[in-house]
Amino acid sequence: MQAYDTLAEWFEYLNDDCGYPKWSQYFLRGLRELGAGERGLELGCGSGYFSRALTREGFRMTAGDLSQPMLSKGARLAAEEGINVEFLRLDARRFSVRKKYDFVLAANDVYNYLPPEALAGAFRSAANALRKGGIFWFDVSSPCKLRGKVADTVSVDDRDEVTYLAFNRLLEDHVEMEVSLFVRGEDGRYTRSDETHVQYLHEKEAIEEALAGFEVLREEGHLGGPWEGSDRWNFICRKV
């Protein structure tokens, strides 16, 4: 199976401890401080948590992802909450859109799924989706996190409805995650599905080199914290 074919249905549920509300407020506060405008594109939106959160605060969001199961889940969640978000199937590596956006947001490891040689092209696609002066805000899981906390570990989340297992190993410039989900059916029996996820390590200098056409406004750790030692790096840029 492709990454997120099955995990899409359970992604937000299994990540309920990641601090989504506080994380959303971080983006909301930062976008307003930057005067980013109201029309936004979220790349790698998953099931659309951030797009829904920003829409509730008055932004006009389009949410794009490569995974059709993720988009379907996101559309259902938005409909259940009575929120108007446009969902599009987009590959962050290379895409085009018909309109220009005030900002592009790519949160929660979107570019870790691309190899280093694909970053420059992916960033050009993001630039092409922005008006001049538009904001490009993205994050990556830092190399120290992937090497020191994810690589060569086993992740387990065991709940009544679903059990998540991930066997993670470091292979040169990337971490390969063999994910198994055991989903409980109405009859009490579990159905197993397997997915492989690959996340690449990106060094700060390589990311900055790939950001041609952007001015880097700020670089900060998770939720605006210190850069050094942070599990997550934020790059906040403006299209020149």
Image (cartoon, helix red, strand yellow):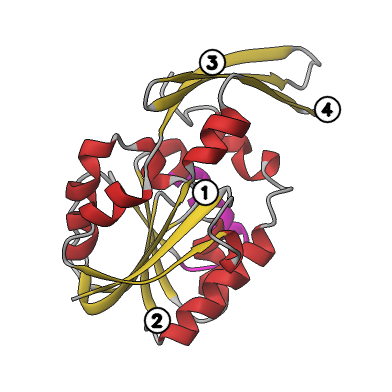
Residue at x 37%, y 44% (from the top left corner): 203
Q: Position of residue 108 (x, y in %)?
A: 50, 50
Residue at x 17%, y 48% (from the top left corner): 121
- Most foreground residue, 27 or 183: 27
Q: First in sequence: mark 1 or mark 2?
A: 2
Q: Give the vertical position of 4 relative to 75 (above or below).
A: above
Identify the disc placed on residue 160. 4
Can you say which quadrant of the picture contains the C terminus? bottom left
**Is residue 216 covered in magenta?**
no
Magenta span: predominant SS is helix
From which residue to which does the magenta span run?
Answer: 71-84
Which amino acid type corresponds to the residue marked 4 in the rendered image?
A: Asp
Which amino acid type corresponds to the residue marked 2 in the rendered image?
A: Glu
Q: First in sequence: mark 3 or mark 4?
A: 4
Mark 1–mark 4 distance (CA, rounded to whole Å): 22 Å
Residue at x 60%, y 64% (from the top left corner): 223
Mark 1–mark 2 distance (CA, rounded to whole Å): 21 Å
Query: Mark 1: which secondary structure?
Result: loop
